[in-house]
Image: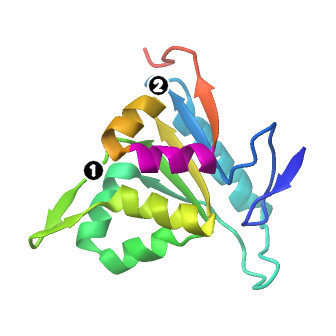
Amino acid sequence: HVHSSACGVLVAWWPHCGFGLFFSGMCGNGKTTWLKAIRTLINSLNLRHPQTNSSYSVSLWNARELAYRCKDEYQEWAQITRLPILAIDDFGTDPKEIISFGNCLTPMIDLITKRYEEQLFTLFTTNLTFSQIKEKYEERIADRLIEMVVPIKFGNGSYRG
């Protein structure tokens, strides 16, 4: 069936009706290429928000860069966490915690929590399994991810030489 996500983008799912996609698999097997293709497609369709008439676009961030943005440019990071559509590449390469002026920040945990609560469409690529995610980010975050996303496993090997 077809499900209209919170951001108005139509996505065809099978039994799961999450509000995101989760590409997982080994290194070099096309996850980021697919993510960039989806970004290009959505950005070129000029989809409009029904209330604001603003155009939807996909903002793509490397997970590690996004985590450090929380420390270095907190206001910008907070705006990124609220974007209608966000793509996070290499999820799991980010540090779980960052110390900033004696404060312990948990950028990805806070980002996922925010996006989960507001049901904002999120795309991820990762080399981690859900059990590794559970180990790194704890059960609460892994459980939220399972509800948030449609998992798409890339089972092929690397396309890189």
Number of other residues with Cα within 10 Å of mark 2, as a class: few under 14, some 14 to 19, many 20 or more: some
Residue 91 versus residue 159: which sits nearer the camera? 91
Question: The residue under label 2 is which amino acid type?
Answer: Gly
The answer to which image quadrant residue 119 occupies is bottom right
Compared across the picture, whether 134 is left or right of 82 comes to left
Residue beneath the point at 58% across and 40% down: 22
Count of marks, rendered view: 2
Residue with the mark numbered 1? 96
Residue 59, compared with residue 130, is above or below; it is below
Q: Position of residue 130 (x, y in %)?
A: 47, 33
Quadrant of the snapshot with the N terminus: top right
Q: Which residues are magenta?
A: 139-149
Tag of residue 29: none
Residue 78 versus residue 115: which sits nearer the camera? 115
Residue 147 within the segment the image draws in magenta:
yes
Residue beneath the point at 27% across and 50% down: 96
Compared across the picture, whether 121 is left or right of 109 comes to right
